[in-house]
Image (spheres, rainbow, N blue to C red):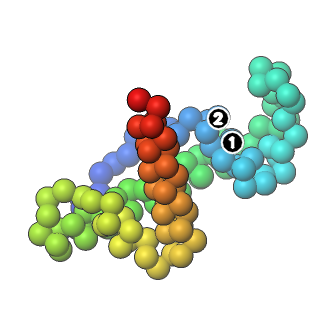
């Protein structure tokens, strides 16, 4: 499989500003840790800088695209046209924490599906 073509990306955020702000808050950004209880009364002093949000958005987008391209390349080495979950596991095999998190989410999803089947 050939290297994917570089395509010009439109300017602006791919992820919503609230998603990026919540992600920063989850990782302990001191600028976002003192939200009021009401989401409507957020003050601008607690909002992260626009450059921080755009940089985080660019990093996330680049990581996701590169991971998907690497998974597609792994699938093409296996002579498959479709990407499987195992291709993503193969790409993430060197990062133990990230692979563990992915496997944990997959395990939780299977548990939720099994519980739904029990109720139906």
The one nearer the camera, 31 or 115, is: 115
Quadrant, the N terminus: bottom left
Residue 61 visible to an observer of this rendering: no
Decide: marks 1, 2 in contact (CB < 8 A)?
A: yes
Residue under the point 17% across and 68% down: 76
Q: Secondary structure at mark 1?
A: helix
Q: In the image, is 92 to the left or to the right of 52?
A: left
Q: Secondary structure at mark 2?
A: helix
Residue under the point 27% across and 59% down: 84
Q: Residue furthest bottom?
A: 94
Q: In the image, is 98 to the left or to the right of 118?
A: right
Q: Position of residue 4 (x, y in %)?
A: 24, 61
Residue 93 visible to an observer of this rendering: yes
The one nearer the camera, 89 or 69, is: 89
Quadrant, the C terminus: top left
The quarter of the displayed image where residue 46 is located: top right
Above-or-below relation of 47 to 54: above
Residue pointed to by mark 2: 18
Instruction: Categorize mark 1 by other alpha carbons within 10 Å: few (<14), some (14-19), many (20+).
Output: some
Q: How many marks?
A: 2
Instruction: Categorize mark 2 by other alpha carbons within 10 Å: few (<14), some (14-19), many (20+).
Output: few
The one nearer the camera, 82 or 35, is: 82
**What is the spatial separation of the Cα atoms under label 1 and label 2, in whole angstroms?**
6 Å
The one nearer the camera, 11 or 76, is: 76
Residue under the point 66% across and 47% down: 23
Residue pointed to by mark 1: 22
């Amino acid at each position: 499989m050939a290297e994917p073509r570089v395509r010009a990306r439109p300017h602006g955020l791919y992820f919503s500003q609230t998603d990026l702000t919540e992600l920063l808050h989850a990782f302990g950004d001191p600028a976002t840790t003192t939200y009021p209880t009401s989401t409507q009364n957020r003050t601008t002093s607690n909002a992260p800088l626009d450059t921080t949000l755009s940089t985080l958005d660019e990093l996330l987008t680049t990581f996701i695209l590169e991971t998907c391209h690497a998974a597609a390349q792994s699938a093409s080495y296996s002579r498959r046209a479709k990407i499987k979950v195992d291709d993503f596991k193969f790409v993430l095999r060197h990062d133990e924490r990230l692979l563990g998190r992915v496997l944990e989410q997959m395990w939780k999803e299977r548990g939720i599906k099994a519980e739904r089947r029990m109720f139906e």
